[in-house]
Amino acid sequence: MRIYLAGPMTGIPHFNYPTFNSAAKALRAAGHIVFNPAEHDIQTHGKDISNPDGCEKQAAAEHGFDRRAALKADLAWICDNAEAIALLPGWRASSGATAEHALASALRLQVIELAE
């Protein structure tokens, strides 16, 4: 199944990349194709922008992170490819993840809530 991985990033140390990467690895091990926004951000910028010192706003600014462009790419992948969305813990507190969930619901995709 083609799964979009959604969850909180902003305000979480390292943009929550470790949690995204761990969940993507588990879903792939189960045989799924996964769009991981953390990996996509790294591919787009050519480097890991999560910044090991935890200051994600500074890291995003330094690397030219554009939230609008990121959401555009993420929502397009959901529209064009996703069969399901997998939601990381804390997704309800994320404006981006709630938008992704709303789109997935509108498209009647399968919704999977992942446990911690």
Image (cartoon, rainbow, N blue to C red):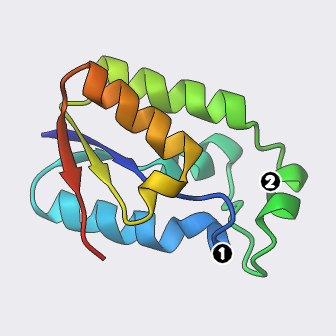
In this rendering, position of residue 61 left or right of residue 14: right
Task: Name the one closer to the observer, 29 or 37.
Answer: 37
Mark 1 surroundings: few (<14), some (14-19) or many (≥20) residues within 10 A: some
Q: Looking at numbered disc 2 in the image, what kind of residue is underneath it?
A: Ala
Q: Which of the 4 quarters of the picture holds residue 81? A: top left
Residue at 60% across, 52% down:
42
Q: Secondary structure at mark 2?
A: helix
Task: Name the one closer to the observer, 62 or 99.
Answer: 99
Mark 2 surroundings: few (<14), some (14-19) or many (≥20) residues within 10 A: some
Q: In the rendering, which numbered label is found on residue 13?
A: 1
Task: Name the one closer to the observer, 47 or 65.
Answer: 65
In this rendering, position of residue 55 left or right of residue 100: right
- Frontmost of labels 2 and 1 is 1
Residue 51 at what x, y percent from top left? Answer: 75, 71
Check the image and report above or below for 42 versus 107.
below
Q: In the rendering, which numbered label is found on residue 60?
A: 2
CB under 8 Å between callouts 2 and 1? no
In this rendering, position of residue 3 left or right of residue 76: left
Residue at 55% across, 68% down:
16
In this rendering, position of residue 115 left or right of residue 31: right
Disc 2 from disc 1: Cα separation = 12 Å
Query: Furthest-front residue in view?
Result: 92
Residue at 38% across, 30% down:
102
Residue 54 at what x, y percent from top left? Answer: 75, 77
Quarter occupied by the N terminus: top left
Q: Looking at numbered disc 1 in the image, what kind of residue is underneath it?
A: Pro
Check the image and report above or below for 86 versus 110.
below
Quarter occupied by the C terminus: bottom left
Residue 50 at what x, y percent from top left? Answer: 68, 66
